[in-house]
Image (cartoon, rainbow, N blue to C red):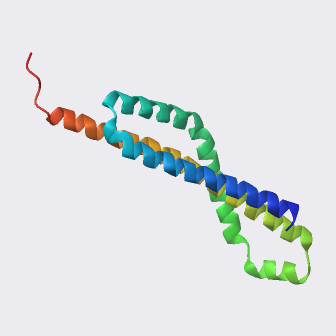
Amino acid sequence: MSTATANFTKQLHDNLEEVEERAKSLKKSINSASKKTQSEIQSKLDEAKAKLDAKRQEFDQYRAKLKTQFEEKESEVKLNVEEWKANREVKKLGHRADKAESYAATALFLAVAMMEEAEEATLEAICSRLDAEAAEAPKAVK
């Protein structure tokens, strides 16, 4: 395996581990929500929103990049690739590989971003449900 391939697969592996950790964190948040007070959940939600807001512009840039890369990928004619292989056009094939690696890295970065958005949305849903339940409960008489 070439150094470029080894580096790329290591980067993908690391990114996938980060996605897995985010999923575990989200699962843990969901499972522990019933044991926390509304203010604890609200605090966690505020923290998640702040984190997400700080990264939103970066996420939007990556989404736009992914869209562009997808369109480029779709426009690449398979016939050209086969021709490049047959003619051993290493430079064109290398450029194609670079673009494919960039596309995969961008997609994985967005997977992590979506996990952060999912965490924020989940906490928001829990807070909303707690608000609804609190409104349903009879008021304490003083």
Above or below, 30 against 73 in this view is above
Residues 3 and 98: in front is 3
Q: Say left or right for 113 vs 36.
A: right
Residues 35 and 62: in front is 35
Q: Where residue 38 sits: x, y (%)?
A: 31, 31
Please give the name of the residue rendered at 81% of the width and 63% of the height, measured from the top-left corner: 5
Residues 68 and 104: in front is 104
Above or below, 113 against 104 in this view is above
Q: Residue furthest left?
A: 141
Query: Where the N terminus falls, by quadrant?
Result: bottom right
Above or below, 53 against 86 in this view is above
Q: Where residue 68 sits: x, y (%)?
A: 66, 58
Please give the name of the residue rendered at 66% of the width and 64% of the height, measured from the top-left corner: 71
Query: Where the C terminus falls, by quadrant?
Result: top left
Above or below, 118 against 124 in this view is below
Q: Say left or right for 44 vs 71.
A: left
Residues 84 and 45: in front is 45
Q: Residue furthest top?
A: 142
Please give the name of the residue rendered at 84% of the width and 64% of the height, measured from the top-left corner: 95
